[in-house]
Image: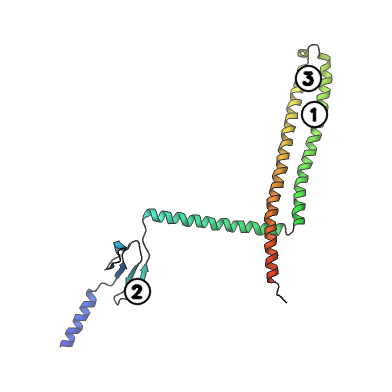
Amino acid sequence: MLAGVVVSVGALAQQTRPSEIYTCVDGKGRRITSDRPIVECLDREQRELDSTGLVRRVLPPSYTAEERAQMAAQRKAEDEQRARVAEERRRDRALVIRYPNQALHDKARAEALAQIDEVVDAVNKREQALEQQRKDIRAELEFYQSDPSKAPLVLQRKIEDNTQQMQVQKRFLEEQAQEKKRINARFDEELAKLRQLWGGNAAASNAAVPQR
């Protein structure tokens, strides 16, 4: 009879014991135990124990909305940085594939500059034609030296048009000169990068060769 009472008391104790127990050490070093997550330990880890006292899981610290926003912003910045690094590596690989040596890079630079030179040659020829046109117009204006206002309207428009065209060609030549500078700057930057990549690839290749 007594054994049955003992068993019944033990069963009752297990039934009344909470199935989840939370425990932690708060900021003041106090050990706290509760049947629910502990407010005093939201900023630190809490351990959830089962009825036998074994750790069921570890709850990570909880954060305020501001802290979560800061963590999200940090993760976003880290993700963006990783994406930038990955994109830079992708561009580097593509650059080395396109220009495996300096000879090919120099050739590409020369071809790009040659295209600009062709355009400049065409503009120079156009300028020469406009200059000849200006001389012809001046020759016609000699008949009206005594009174330029009597020059035909068509002739006056030719003068204006010629002047505008000369200005357009001059601006275009200036733009082409700037474009050549941009091309050279781009190829210079690429070449500096390629030399690093070529050197790195050569070092990797040498390291891969077994020593005898």
Q: Amino acid at mark 2?
A: Val
Comes first in the chain, label 2 or label 1:
2
Q: Amino acid at mark 1?
A: Leu
* 81 to the left or right of 188: left
- Residue in the picture at 24% in, 74% down: 17
Give how far across and how far down residue 71 sits, in percent. Answer: 43, 57
Q: Give the label, 2 or 1, closer to the camera.
A: 2
- Residue in the picture at 78% in, 14% down: 148
Task: Tell me how many marks there are.
Answer: 3
The residue labelled by disc 2 is 55
Q: Give the label, 3 or 2, closer to the camera.
A: 2
* 120 to the left or right of 94: right
Give how far across and how far down residue 72 sits, in percent. Answer: 44, 56
Front position in the image: 151 or 77: 77
Q: Amino acid at mark 3?
A: Leu
The residue labelled by disc 3 is 155
The residue labelled by disc 1 is 130
Q: Give the label, 1 or 3, closer to the camera.
A: 1
Q: In this rendering, is residue 189 above or below 118?
A: below
Front position in the image: 156 or 54: 54
Which quadrant does the C terminus fall into?
Answer: bottom right
Question: For residue 97, what is the image quadrant?
Answer: bottom right
Give how far across and how far down residue 204 sits, in percent. Answer: 67, 67
Q: Residues within 10 Å of mark 1 (few under 14, many from 20)?
A: some
Comes first in the chain, label 1 or label 3:
1
